[in-house]
Image (tube, rainbow, N blue to C red):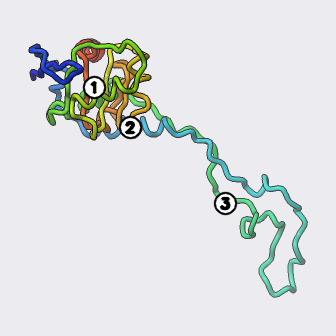
Amino acid sequence: MEVKVVNISGKETGAKVQLPESVFGVTPNDHAIYLDVKQYLANQRQGTHKSKQRNEIAGSTRKLYKQKGTGGARAGSIKSPLFNGGGRVFGPQPRDYSFKLNKKLKSLARKSALAYKAQDNSIVVLEDFSFDSIKTKNYLNLVNALNLANEKTLLVLPEQNNNIYLSSRNIQKTKVITAGDLNTYDVLNAGKLLLTANSLKTLEEAFAK
């Protein structure tokens, strides 16, 4: 699949690039995508939630009233889950939500997500660029030139570029990552995928391994 290369002004450069079939031409696997996105979201969870059980509540363990003869249900300490301020039964405890996925499955999921973007014509290839300074206005001009001001965009760079990253950080609906950090969730969450010529080569090399 051929895609025209545009510059940061949104104008065609006359060059074209071929999206590698080994990456963008695979048959998408929805279940692999589901598992990879599920793992990504699970890994975002801190898992630090905690409620106190009855043995952790501060309070007396004295029996509230005698066992029999009151006409009411028997009761032990004030820390019982049945009373206000008592412990919680089967409450949340700190835990790790992460789980393992095979590398080949994760690779298939990412290629599947990229293939969906290619099928939807949601990929824009930019010529390699950089900013001389850190200015939000520079990145806003780029987005406006591409007519993507109202769309979620994901810009994939071949390597870390602080000027571009910091210029985009304060803009809603935009995200900048490197090709090495590409993940299925971000690809599917973006309306348009912005790739540079060099990031395409980096992706092809990474998925060829």
Give the residue type at disc 2: Gln
Neighbour class for label 2 at 10 Å: few (<14), some, many (≥20)?
few
**Is residue 116 something one can see in this rendering?**
yes
Identify the residue at horizontal 42%, vertical 36% (top origin).
39
* Mark linked to residue 48: none
Image height check: is 82 above or below 68? above
> In the depicted view, which residue is nearer to us: 26 or 181?
181
Image quadrant in which you'd find residue 160: top left
For marks 1 and 2 on the same chain, the one whose residue lies earlier in the sequence: 1
SS for callout 1: helix
Percent across and percent down for residue 75 are: 81, 73
| Comparing labels 2 and 3, the label whose residue is closer to the camera | 2
Query: Dot 1 corresponds to which residue?
Result: 142
Q: Which residue is mark 2?
A: 172
Q: Residue at x 22, y 28 (%)?
A: 145
Provide the residue designation for mark 3: 89
Q: Secondary structure at mark 3?
A: loop
Q: Is residue 32 above or below residue 126?
A: below
- State which tag comes first along the sequence, 1 or 3: 3
Q: Position of residue 16 (x, y in %)?
A: 11, 16
